[in-house]
Amino acid sequence: MKMMKPYVWLQTSDDSIQQVEQEIAMFCPLICQEIIQKGMGSSKNCAICLPQQVSPAMLSLILDYCRFHQVPGRSNKERKSYDEKFVRIDTERLCELTSAADSLQLKPLVDLTSRALARIIEGKTPEEIRDIFHLPDDLTENVEVEEEHVDDRSVDDLLSFINGNDGGKLNILTILIFVFT
Amino acid sequence: MTSPSERYQKLGLRESLQKCYRYPIACKELSFILREAFHQIPKSLQSIIFEDTLFAFRLLPEKVKVVVRVDASLCGYDRSVEAALPNRKKNVAVTEFKHAMVSHKRRSKAQLVEKASVQLPQDILVHVFSFLDMKSLVSAGLVCWSWNIAANDNHLWQMQYVVLFGSGAKLKHTKPVEGKNYRLLQGTVDNRLITNWKDSVKGAYTVVWLNNAKCPNVHSGISEIQDIKPVTAFQVVEYLLDDSLSITSSSDSDSDYEGGPVSKLWAYGKFRKKRRRDNQEKRLQGTLFTSTMCESCHFEKIFKAEKTNDVWDTLQRAYGGAEKTRKYELLSMLDQEFVANYFSRLQLLVNSIRPWRSGDSTKYGRESLVDIILQSKDTAKMKEFQGSFEAHELKLLSRNSDRVIEEQALQAEVS
């Protein structure tokens, strides 16, 4: 029976196609749906298209996770310590992993990574969080933008202003050139 | 008539270039000027414009935030530079431009990579935030726009509310309404009707802080004490900003107290009283902190402080050595408050007192009900006092007398 282990074909965001054990891939509700409802993934030609968020690296991480938890007879303690080690990756990858897991509707992993992210955020100041997540401070920037007044001087106003009175000589042709460049 | 160079100065292009959001517009204008007017303007102005052009190129790598718009406007810019400038200058400009473009592309690429990986969808953010405590949640809300929206999710705040005040149908929510005279009109709101949970949590901030944002009995704790009247944000802010609020009355009693003979009651249990009052101050500082948080002014400054003690230091620094005595005012009875309410409020404060590092010596403040209560060496006696106070209140209500008389009467009775 072991030789007959069914495989499923998955296509990740970079268009590469991988072959994965079906029982592991079935852990992800999204893949499971595709297989059962649409009969996809049975061959390389009708591989299951995974969502944009799932890069090959993330897919292999997710499959590792599924592979571990799919094995029966593991104690809770074992699972817990595996989970703990599993999310010990840098923040950027953790974010990627969270959105990839979310797009595959893999709820336990989403919970796990979200908890890990929350632990990172907890007790930090906004600046520290911004540093860790490389986020722009667009809250204060927005205030700046609000003050921005729209510049409604037309182009030929500007030119005639520079050139003094003879700017008025500019003909329509010049303006047209502007428009088309 | 002004000269062209003066008019050019008036355009303020150089200043505009330095501002991130003005940069694309300024670039566009500059490129038009280069192409259309460069040959007609005097040499001196030409060199100024050329300088500005180079300046614009040098700034380019920094303006990655407006990538799209800059790219669009620069396409024309590049060409107009080449068309307008004399050869020698053109070479300089072109090399500068190439350098700028290279580093600009590199930076915008780096930023794009960053952005793509870190942007989390809103629903995931909300999910992540659901694991946070209140302080971190507020903090996360200040990070950036998308996080702010996620952190204001109503459901999150409902959860916070439930954690702090317990759940269940019996939960009643008191909603302070700020009237014209900053008076508290208390209305009880059925929690099924509450839609904005963040406001609900905010509305109860005093209680939140008194327990140091951690309710000891998560599900039953505070909500059992019914009529707690929070101090409004108005009152606290008024305190902080308006120095004159209670100085006149407190300074009188201050000098009275320090200069004059110490009465029996005052002398009794002095140390303990001081300690307690110190602690109460700390609590009140907590109140200040939380309400300021709600007001969100000075939030950043205060937020960094871990302990209430630090908060106080920060606040004191911020407001230039605020009068310590003013704080007591917070504990004094509100005009419309009944003794029972006041006592439950006080008791909450007193009960939550823990040993606290009392660093600075406190100037004895205003004689108020607090003082009288705190001098009693035993909080158990408070019940007694409460009884007599309540009796007094009844009398006073009918007599409609003012506070000074009330205090004197109470003091007389206590001694």
Image: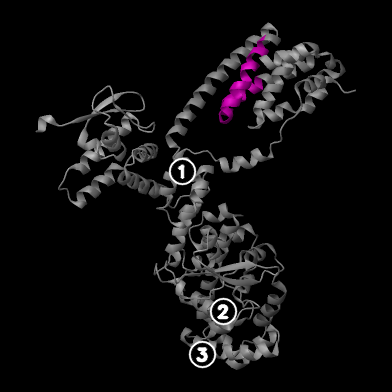
In the foreground, B345 or B254: B345
Q: Under tag 2, what secondary structure?
A: helix
Image quadrant in which the C terminus of chain B is located: bottom right
The answer for which chain carries disc 3 is: B
Cα–Cα span, label 2 and label 3:
14 Å
Characterize the local packing of mark 1: few (<14), some (14-19) or many (20 or more) Cα atoms within 10 angstroms: some
Q: In this view, does A92 lie to the left or right of B389?
A: left
The answer for which chain carries disc 2 is: B
Label whose residue precedes the other's in the sequence (2 or 3): 2
Write down the region rendered in magenta. B54-82
Residue found 68% across the figure and 19% down from its top: B53
Residue found 35% across the figure and 32% down from its top: A54
Name the residue type under label 3. Answer: Glu
In the foreground, B373 or B391: B391
Q: Under tag 3, what secondary structure?
A: helix
Cα–Cα span, label 3 and label 1:
55 Å
Label 3 sits on residue: B384
Label whose residue precedes the other's in the sequence (2 or 1): 1
Q: Is residue B55 found inside the magenta-colored segment of the image? A: yes
Q: Tell me the mark number nearer the camera, choosing from 3 and 1.
A: 1
Query: Do we see residue B322 in this rendering?
Result: no
- Image coords of residue B167 (percent x, y): 42, 66
Cα–Cα span, label 2 and label 1:
44 Å
Characterize the local packing of mark 3: few (<14), some (14-19) or many (20 or more) Cα atoms within 10 angstroms: few
The answer for which chain carries disc 1 is: B
> How many discs mark residues in the rendered view?
3
In the foreground, B27 or B152: B152
Label 2 sits on residue: B342
Q: Residue B93 carries which label?
A: none
- Image coords of residue B169 (percent x, y): 44, 69
Question: Same subunit under labels 2 and 3?
Answer: yes
